[in-house]
Amino acid sequence: MQSHHLFIQGIILGLLPIGVLVLHAENPLLPGNWIIFAGVVALTLVFWGTLQIFRAPRLTAMLALAGISLGNFILFFEYQSDPLFTMFALLTSIALLYYFCSGKLYPPIELTGSLQLERMLGAALSVAILTLFSPLFVYESQLYTLAVFISLLMLDLLAYKYTSCIRKTKFKTIMRSFAIVMLLTFIWLYYADFIILGGLMTGLSSVAVLLYKKHADLQFLGIILQHPARGLAITFFLLCIGGTLLLRTPVAMQNELSVLEAAFTATSASCVTGLTVIDISSELTLCGRSFLLLLIQLGGLGIMTLTAMALHALGKLSLSGEQLLNKLAEPQEQDIFKTLKLIVIFTFTNELIGALLLTWGFYTVHHNLPLALELGIFTSVSAYCNAGFFPGTENLVPYAGEKFLLIITALEIILGGIAPAITYSYLKIQKYRQLPVISQLILKTTAILLLAGTFLLLLFEWNGIFKDMAWYDKLVNAFFQSATLRTAGFNTVNFALLSMPSYIVMLILMFIGGSPGGTAGGIKTTTLAVLALTFRSAIRGDDQVNISFNTVRQSTINKAVAILISAALVLILTIFMLTATQTLPAKQLVFEAVSALATVGLSLNCTTSLDAVGQIIIMLAMFIGRIGPLTLFLLLSEKQFSKRPGYPTIKIPLA
């Protein structure tokens, strides 16, 4: 039996109490006490299904579907007036249905102590999550406090249940006594502040203790490097949290930032996006901007790359860690660490050269060496990492006529968007006489997208946003925008004045993004190329997809389709949540959603107009876009192994 099923069951049991918020809902179809009765029935169905999850998976799915459907019916009218609750309720419903109705659930033979620990760990994590999000629900503090208390009670009961698996009588007595004392303490001191603070301390300490109990003989970094999807998600999540704390320090702030503002900025920097709700030039000190640059560098280069190199230098990287890095870096060389070293050296070399050139360019404009040095270094790192942050109020709009600055910045963006290992292969063309097939594919696709973007923007905006520029400035700005749309996020013009054809072109270029192994986001150029080659083979009637006398593997085609579908699903969900919770025009919200998911950072001047719910949605989109939408689904599923050697083929008519 897969132990992580019990971990997820613990999370569900710990988060179910948030359903008590249904008691504050109003539904004209359920007057009086009927709404309370319906809410209790809905919670009971989901809770019953969770407990039956291993004994009867099909019954579980039906109970969960009934409970979630009833709960959403109760909250239907509440969704129209409370966007924050709408977002959390819908996300929870989708996650529950996905888990209950997907994959195989194998019944446990015996709930041993280790399996009980998995369930306790999930419940403890739920308690920590509920308390961390408590500031967003202050408007309903009494019911939310009750939800946290019930979640704590659930954790206490699971801890008491765990003691039945302990053979040491003395230790069992101590554990049960501690659980009872904690429960009585929470009942005796039942008021909002104590429950929330106590729940946070209990949840976090329980997670730490249980992780140590489960992995006492392993290093924490080793645990992170056990699984590619999990490793990516955990490291970037920790980087976002660490960045939030750094930006909230007194030395980083000119004016005090709220937690949400700091979290949004840190997430945007860690995910190398560039969207921001503050003016970093006036809200952050020089130290704060240095912290921001550090987050951009770690997020762009990949904190896992640096971690792996450190562990390798210490001789403490496991075999599973090496396998993970091979999946992440997809090295062109046999030696993965040679590739990692190449990535780091090539990155810093390009950023240094770019910083020197950009410093000279900014000095010719401002004639102020300290300012030019800061702008040059910041822009170089931000451009190479495809982040789009710039320490100026109007981004690069004041420099729309500075051709040297724009060309150098565009080249930095292009080099960062292409994998360093791929770029390095171009430099060794004389040695190999011919570029590898993958390098050729990336180079051709990148060139086509750059030229097509430049031409189309010139075509549609010659007398539009480029109207007041000379022809050579129009050409340079069109090329710059074509490059920056590939997830960099700089802008030299006012995008609010875009024509609709240019708007569509920008959405397409942002969604495609850069190349795998680079710092850009999007579905990647190779995914587009594989899909285009598959389309060509389909219309030709070929059974295989060929390129340069090579056949593309079917698994590669399947993955390209999965990447496209997963990105489209996440994008549709993001747009749906934004349009359901925000009052801004749909055109702006769609652009914002694509920009966040593709980690571009461009905006139609609406980021600062988003409320707390909109900012949280964009933060989630940026995070998912950085780790990859497909990675999100890998986190929610497991690999299924067929017990049969194969199945007979079937031909399904598609047209």
Image (tube, grey):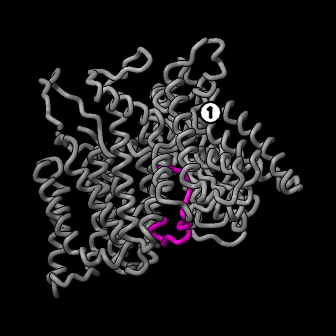
Q: Position of residue 277 (x, y in %)?
A: 58, 66
* Kind of residue at badge 1: Ala
Say whether residue 528 is magenta.
Answer: no
Q: Is residue 604 above or below residue 641?
A: below
Q: Is residue 414 above or below residue 582?
A: above
Residue found at x 53% / y 41%: 452
Q: Horizontal placement of 176 versus 439: left or right?
A: left
In which quadrant of the rendered view does residue 83 lie? bottom left
Residue pictured at 35% horizontal, 57% vertical: 573
Q: Is residue 478 left or right of residue 10?
A: right
Q: Residue at x 64, y 47 (%)?
A: 480
Residue 359 in the image: x percent, y percent?
81, 47
- Determine if the magenta segment contains residue 601: yes
- Position of the N terminus, as image quadrant, is top left
Observer-nearest of 651 and 103: 651
Seen at 72% across and 63% down, the residue is 281
Residue 621 location (% of width, % of height): 45, 55
Circle 1 SS class: helix
The answer to which of 171 and 36 lies nearer the viewer is 36
Q: Which residue is mark 1?
A: 310
Q: Is residue 242 visible?
A: no
Q: Quadrant of residue 467?
A: bottom right
Q: Quadrant of residue 258?
A: bottom right
The total number of labels drawn is 1
Foreground residue among 428 and 79? 428
Part of the protein shown in magenta? 596-615
Residue 195 visible in the shown view? yes
Q: Quadrant of the C terminus?
A: top left
